[in-house]
Image (cartoon, rainbow, N blue to C red):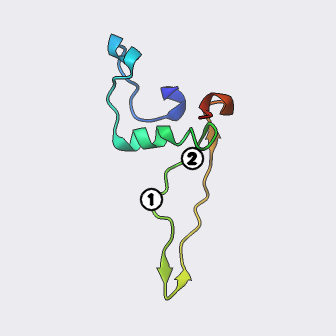
Amino acid sequence: MWKRLHLGAAPKPSPSIAVGVCEATPYEIATAYTLFPNGGMLRPLQHIARITSGGRDVTKKATVVAREVAKPETTFL
C-alpha cells in the first residue's frame, strides 16, 4: 500500500510494523487518511478552500487528478 500512495520512503521492515509503528510526517498521515472518505481514491491535499477580494471569489480552480489506490469496499467505514 505504501508504494501505491507514493508517500516518502517506505518503512524499513521490522517486527513493529505489524502493530502499525513506523515513522511518518503529519502530511503523509493526512494524505493516507483521505482514502476513507474518498472511496479508495487518492487526491492531493488542498490547503486553501477560497480566496475573496472585494466580495468576489478569486480562487484559481485546481485541477485535481485522483487515482485509485484501494478498492472502495476495503475503505468503507
Residue identified by numbered label 1: 47
- Picture quadrant where residue 21 is located: top left
Which percent across, then down, holds residue 52? Answer: 49, 79
- From the viewer's perspective, tell me whether residue 22 is left or right of residue 58: left
Q: Using the image, tell me which numbered label, if any, was put on residue 31.
A: none
Residue located 40% across and 34% down the image: 8
25 over 3 or under it: above or below: below
Residue identified by numbered label 2: 43
- Picture quadrant where residue 72 is located: top right
Marks 2 and 1: in contact by CB < 8 Å?
no
Q: Quadrant of the C terminus?
A: top right
Q: What amino acid is labelled 2 in the image?
A: Arg
For numbered disc 1, what is the local secondary structure?
Answer: loop
- Picture quadrant where residue 29 is located: top left
- From the viewer's perspective, tell me whether residue 18 is left or right of residue 46: left
- Depth order, front residue of 4/38: 38
Residue located 58% across and 61% down the image: 62
38 over 73 or under it: above or below: below
Which percent across, then down, holds residue 75? Answer: 60, 32
Residue located 49% across and 56% down the image: 46
19 over 61 or under it: above or below: above
Looking at this rendering, what residue extends furthest in the front direction?
Answer: 77
Q: What amino acid is labelled 1 in the image?
A: His
For numbered disc 2, what is the local secondary structure?
Answer: loop
